[in-house]
Image: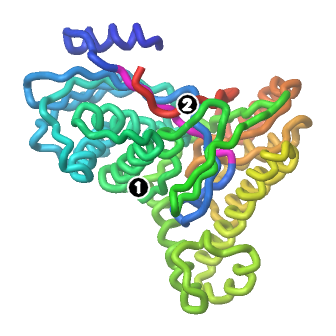
Amino acid sequence: MTTQEMNQAFEQAYGRKAEKIFFAPGRVNLIGEHTDYNGGCVFPCALSFGAWLLIAPNADKVLRFRSLNMPQTYEIAIYAIKPQADRAWCNYALGCIDIIARRHPEAKLQSGYDLLYFGNVPAGAGLSSSAAMEVVTARAFTEEMGWTLADDKKYRTELALIGQACEHEYAGVMCGVMDQFASAQGKKDHAIYLNCDTLEFEHVPVKLEGIKVVISNTHSPHHLDSGAYNDRVRQCKTAVEQISKVKPIKFLAELTPEDWAAVQDAVTDPIAKKRARHVVGEVARTAQAVEALKQGKIELFGELMTASHVSLRDDYEVTGKELDTLAEAAWQVEGVLGSRMTGGGFGGCTVSLVRDEAIETFKAFVGKEYEEKTGLKADFYVAEIGDGVMRL
């Protein structure tokens, strides 16, 4: 859908023109999964698809929410902002407005607004459609409510933190900051090497000559708020508590593989031990993968992606039949350097590095294997790495 078509949709919905339009991207994480809330590093990049928000103030002191992707509409008084029942989609926006006001008392919501959202992130694909919606809302309403920062990097980090707080408080998902951070801080043709504890980060050029990043959608939607994600968060906290009796730590990511070998017996909970083993290994893999990319060792980067999936399958147990089928089929295709699940898991997508000449073979073989084994049809997207949130 073009911006002209979105503007026409806004005018049709509200009988007047939108005053401003904003965009925030979805993301794909190349490596470093379930490390973010464990204080570790991740390596995501922003995508060229995401969420758009068109807005115009109104004189009615109400927030009117419409989406071109959802049938439900909402009208909420600006003095009665609170989480809406039944997992209402407007919570991902409403929470950001509320949190901006609470984090920054100088920010004032002076009027009501008519809002129209449109997203082209595949639904339930694990490519951060919710984070894109949060970040685009935070970008729009920090401006509308009169709060911003001259330092662009710090401002974008704050947008990410607002979105993360919204996810915690309004969606009930105790996620790390990676998704919102990638949407806010993305840079074209770069991935973000982010330390999720300190929020220090580096934009790393993604130079893949003759190789493409291919995203494969299981069409088996993931549900982070199903409880399984929050279970993993609790299991990792259990591991930290038990390890801290012999080696004080705040996060699992503080441990090197050598440290883990020395303290692993302190983790008496067998499930927590498996979760911790994944996190420690994934943090080390991510550092190694970023260095490999910087040195142009793309084959090594691919091997580490594959090792990441195996760990997520066996130790973190967040893959499942659909994701495993896609990854394992990809590993059989000549010209595939590596393939892994991406995102929170429990459905969603895989990300693969595929040589240009193998892309059509990849789609045909992986698609056929996947449909035969699951009864579902996969979709494939050749990813473009784009910029972070912006006003258009």
Residue 339 sits in quarter: top right
Viewer-closest of 366 and 274: 274
Percent of width and height locating residue 377: 66, 31
Q: Is residue 51 above or below residue 314?
A: above
Q: Does 52 sit left or right of 102 as displayed?
A: right
Residue at the image position 51 percent from the left and 79 percent from the top: 238
The residue carrying mark 1 is 173
The answer to which of 234 and 213 lies nearer the viewer is 213
Question: Amino acid type of disc 1?
Answer: Val
Q: Is residue 246 left or right of residue 86?
A: right
Residue under label 2: 387
Residue 322 visible to an observer of this rendering? no
* Crowd band around label 1 with a 10 angstrom C-alpha radius: few (<14), some (14–19), many (20+): some
| Residue pictured at 61% horizontal, 85% vertical | 267
Mark 2: amino acid: Asp
SS class, disc 1: loop
Highlighted magenta segment, given as a residue range: 21-30
